[in-house]
Image (cartoon, rainbow, N blue to C red):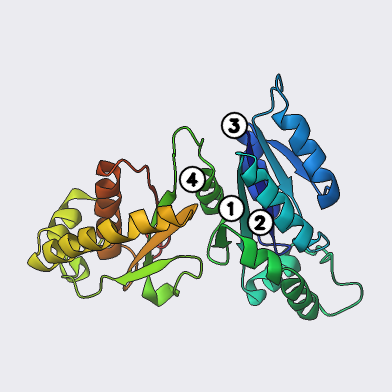
Amino acid sequence: MVDFAVITGLSGAGRSTAADVLEDQGWFVIDNMPVALMPKVAELAMKPGSDVSKVAFVVGSNSDSDELAVMLQDLRSSGARARLLFLDARSDVLIRRYESTRRRHPASAGALLGVAIEQERLALDRMRALADVVVDTSELNVHQLRERVEGLFADSEDSPGMQVTVLSFGFKHGLPADVDMVLDCRFLPNPHWVDELRPQTGQDDAVRGFVLGSDLAVGFLERLDGLLDVLLPAFQAEGKAYLTLAFGCTGGRHRSVAIAEEVARRLHERGLLPGVSHRDVGKGG
């Protein structure tokens, strides 16, 4: 089976970085190809004897979203795996990125940078709606984005069916915009108020024991197991390719990290291979 991916999204949101990640993983990456030509490339890749097993197309706002939707549906109908990744970011973040690099926005054409970004956002609205997964890169550095893309496009043989990502974050740093479900862990005992635990994180055994050993955490995880018993088969039956579960605490260093690690462990016991990402664990406070 040939694996196909389409990478799209706002200019400055990380399309080039995502393309580099897939190329490093052995994908045949094609940038800026007209959508009308993509089916021909797909046909060649799927021919008997072809040594190409993974093809990624990188497209921008100048591509026809309706043609792209038809192509993705045709690929899926043929038995191939076809996924669309949309990279997003807040406008203020994109403005800062362009100003720091002094690059010209491809859609500017004399317009103010902020106006050009919003025009491109509008033009890509249909592609965003088609996406299997949307990744907001506003709070991600290059290394974090690479890690996220690597997890999303792990070899299909190693990640059968729906791919699940478990994310921890801190509410003080903002809600993640690209997740399917957010669960608040701020009701759990807070290691921040224990002097010897404060410098540690939820990945350390002492903090993990403190958080998971509470009656509240035990009850919460038991009920979450029951909820996932219902949700996971239902999402898979709907053909959902990606599911991201986010757990938040105040700073994103202790409670949410410990819970996310434990949930990932339990998902692994269910036969899934979840990716785990701790968005704010390295931030102070």
Q: Quadrant of the C terminus?
A: bottom left
Q: Specify which label sits upstream in the sequence, 3 or 2.
A: 3
Residue extending furthest left? 215
From mark 3 to mark 2, how far is it between C-alphas?
28 Å
Mark 1: amino acid: Val
- In the displayed structure image, the side of residue 85 where residue 11 appears, left or right: right
Q: Are marks 3 and 1 in contact (CB under 8 Å)?
A: no
Residue designated by label 1: 142
Residue designated by label 4: 151
Q: Specify which label sits upstream in the sequence, 4 or 3.
A: 3
Residue designated by label 3: 1
Mark 4: amino acid: Gly
From mark 4 to mark 3, how far is it between C-alphas?
20 Å
Dot 3, how many residues are within 10 Å of its Cα: few (below 14), some (14-19), or many (20+)? few
Q: Specify which label sits upstream in the sequence, 1 or 4.
A: 1
Q: Quadrant of residue 13?
A: bottom right
Instruction: Determine the secondary structure under disc 3.
Output: loop
Residue designated by label 2: 14
State the image coordinates of residue 277 (x, y, percent, origin top left).
41, 54
Q: Quadrant of residue 136?
A: bottom right
Instruction: Determine the secondary structure under disc 4.
Output: helix
Residue extending furthest top? 49
From mark 1 to mark 4, how far is it between C-alphas?
14 Å
Q: Are marks 3 and 2 in contact (CB under 8 Å)?
A: no
